[in-house]
Image (tube, rainbow, N blue to C red):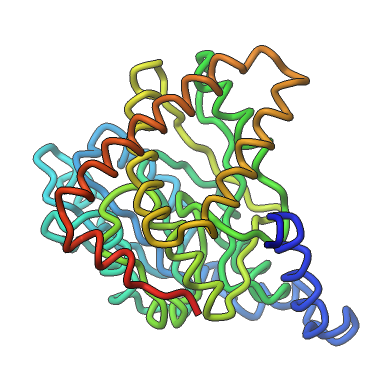
Amino acid sequence: MLSYAESVQNIVQNRTADQPSKSQAVQPKELLSQLTPNGIVPVTVVVCSRNRGHVIGRCLDSVKAARPAEIIVVDGNSSDDTVAIARAHGVRIISDNGAGLGAARQLGASVAQNEYVVFVDTDVVVEPETFAQLLEEALTDGYDAVEAELLTYAPKPTYWQEAESWRRQVEFVKGVALVLGCQITLVRRDLLVQVGFDPAFKGAAEDADFCFRARAAGAVVAFSYKAVAYHEDRLSLMDLILQKIWHGRGLARMITRYGSQYLVRAASQVEDSMGAAKFNLHYLPFIAISWFFTAVGLGLEFLKLMREPALRKSLKSFQVA
């Protein structure tokens, strides 16, 4: 079985063999001027939300400043002022009727009017150039999906926010990747139509599942070399614990569906984090707590799957090409 690094190297070699030479490729500045003659970036931004009134306004302010051609908010039956704030920003609002994150992402993509879709989470703030830079990389480098680098959005970060920022620095290796998140990620719309998000992933890991199936369909996904956005990481220990339990539940569904294929990637993440921690003991408490409560979420979700054989069967029956 190939290691994570060997798998990435194979993707790079295969993609490079099919790429035109630098002299044949359209230069980035020329390409962008062709695509954005009036300053509008031809992408549809999809923001999925549920009870996110405390952050969605700031997110939409930054999204509008980046001048995408279309903005869609997919709301999951919010009971707070999320919808009112979105409406005040003049964006299109549709409802997923509380179907969950996987269904919400796919619903937004299904009604998008542009060739590329950018998913932006409500706790993310983008720069004015973020969408243009993601689109430029996708077109010039032949990527089917590109994720921007996330920096911490916090004037005075707590220990837990600093630690989460450090974790991303360890895991975010620019260029071709095996799996992306979808906090701030551009994806070809036809790939979303072909592969799609699975509504069985109502919470975490809907993006990892999409990437596994997209790559099985021949897609190339990558971390951006220059696009940047800002993420409001979990402020307190309790916030972090709840997030890691949520991640663990998604991980359980990934393991149920993909078995050893996903365990190789998970083992690689643990190895990278522990290896980096040897040089920065300051973050060992963060790592220990993160993996402990991820394991808690994993156990809770496995118990749920034992009680729901139909869901377990639907996850296991999926075959990767």
Q: Quadrant of residue 92?
A: bottom left
The mark total stands at 0
User: From the image, which quarter does the N terminus lie in?
Assistant: bottom right
Residue located 33% across and 34% down the image: 297
Image location of residue 237, percent across then percent down: 40, 16
Q: Is residue 216 left or right of residue 252?
A: right
Q: 193 or 137: which is nearer to us? A: 193
Residue located 69% across and 14% down the image: 281
Q: Is residue 42 left or right of residue 265?
A: left
Q: 200 or 39: which is nearer to us? A: 200
Image location of residue 266, percent across then percent down: 55, 45
Observer able to see residue 60: no
Image location of residue 159, percent across then percent down: 53, 14
Residue located 41% across and 55% down the image: 254
Image location of residue 320, percent across then percent down: 47, 74
Q: Quadrant of residue 298?
A: top left
Q: Is residue 77 left or right of residue 214?
A: left
Residue located 29% across and 48% down the image: 203
Observer able to see residue 132: yes
Query: Where 38 sits versus 239, above or below?
Result: below
